[in-house]
Image (tube, rainbow, N blue to C red):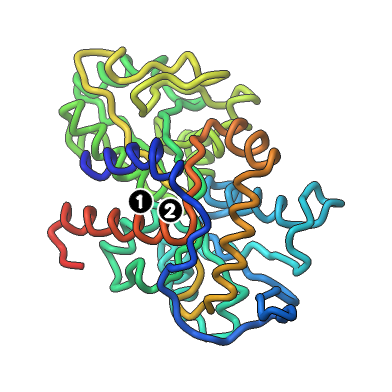
Amino acid sequence: MKKISTLLLTSALTLGLLAGCGNDASSSGSGASGSGSGDGAFVPEGTVTWVCTSSAGGGSDIFSRQIQTILGPESGGGLGLVDATIVVDNRTDGAGEIGRNYVATMREGDADVTLLTFNSGDLMPMCDNTDNRVQNFTPLAIMAVDKQLLFKGEHTPYADMQAVIDAVNSGTAVTVGGSKGDDIATYEAMIAELGFTEDQMPYITYDSTSDAITAVLGGHVDIVIAKPASASQYVEAGRIEAILALATERYTGNLADAPTLSEVGDYEDVEVPVWRGVVGPANMSEAAADYWSDMLKQVSESEQWKTDYLEKNLLISNYMDRETATQYMLDYQADYLASIGKDA
């Protein structure tokens, strides 16, 4: 996991700067639910389905809807880049695997107007639990890097992270809530550094971060792992408070008071950065993949993306085009499979 995190952080500083407008990502199929201009370029028609395997309000959902808005009409605050109607379809069944498989097996034609939000937190459980791999999709872009924090809720009986640690050391089980994939990996890295077992600090998995935050607000878990995008509205309302930055440095703004783990005690800082990307079905045509890759590049360069998403939600800009994103996802997958003792 440390190797994977290092790979991601190195990429965030370098690969994003190298990304151009690659056209060589591997995809197959020639069907298209769109029209062609005189030069044969793809233009989507009708409805575009954007599958998101997180519940409404979760980090992946916010990511998907922000891009949907920017691509959409100027009357809705967008840039008017796509004339077709884009509909976000939240498919969380089977911890998101049903939604991912739906996209992976999409037939030609519909494949050109089907997109999927896909991040490292999706890749890990997919590789753990299914036969789907990056090769079953058409990577289109990586857009940003995200990280997590620990939050307490209104009913949490612990004032700060030191109080949480003291409670566990005294024999009290402290329950953590969170989403899938990267949240679980972050939790595992954190308790390993703290020297706790899963019995001492149990983890409850929810369909999305927003569901986990609802659980801590209701007192069903003691603390919750969440990212700034999902947590910001609750922090602003004073309903949750950040008690630990799961990163190598503190956050800014209303999260600035949360210390890193090395500031709490004699520990190493823990972070499992999350890359956030977009893929299409394996059967997406080259023309459609080129089109969506270009649209996502324009989104990444827009002022709305920088201010309304990256800055507002404290993410790291890390755009990668088709070619770069494809190779990056494949490398990340290979490292992860090796870390869990599986063959590609």
Q: Is residue 90 above or below residue 121?
A: below
Q: Name which residue lies at 29% across and 73% down.
A: 131
Query: Dot 1: within a 10 Å radius of its alpha carbon, few (fewer than 14), some, or many (20 or more) residues?
Result: many
Query: Dot 2: within a 10 Å radius of its alpha carbon, few (fewer than 14), some, or many (20 or more) residues?
Result: many
Q: Name which residue lies at 24% across and 36% down.
A: 189
Q: CA distance from mark 1 to mark 2?
A: 9 Å
Quarter of the picture containing the C terminus is bottom left
Q: Position of residue 247 (x, y in %)?
A: 36, 27
Using the image, tell me which numbered label, if any, was put on residue 181.
1
Judged from this view, the residue extending furthest toward the front is: 39
31 or 260, which lies in front? 31
Q: Position of residue 1 (x, y in %)?
A: 22, 43
Q: Is residue 173 left or right of residue 311?
A: left
Q: Name which residue lies at 27% across and 24% down.
A: 269
204 or 265, which lies in front? 265
Q: Is residue 113 left or right of residue 120?
A: right
Kind of element beneath mark 1: loop
Res 97 → quadrant:
bottom left
Labelled pair 1, 2 in contact (Cβ < 8 Å):
yes
Residue type, mark 1 in image: Gly
Q: Is residue 128 left or right of residue 256?
A: left
208 or 115, which lies in front? 115
Q: Is residue 147 above or below residue 331?
A: above
For marks 1 and 2, give the one nearer the viewer.
Answer: 2
Q: Name which residue lies at 37% across and 51% down.
A: 120
Disc 2 designates what residue? 119
Judged from this view, the residue extending furthest toward the left is: 341
| Residue 300 appears in the picture as rendered | yes
Kind of element beneath mark 2: strand
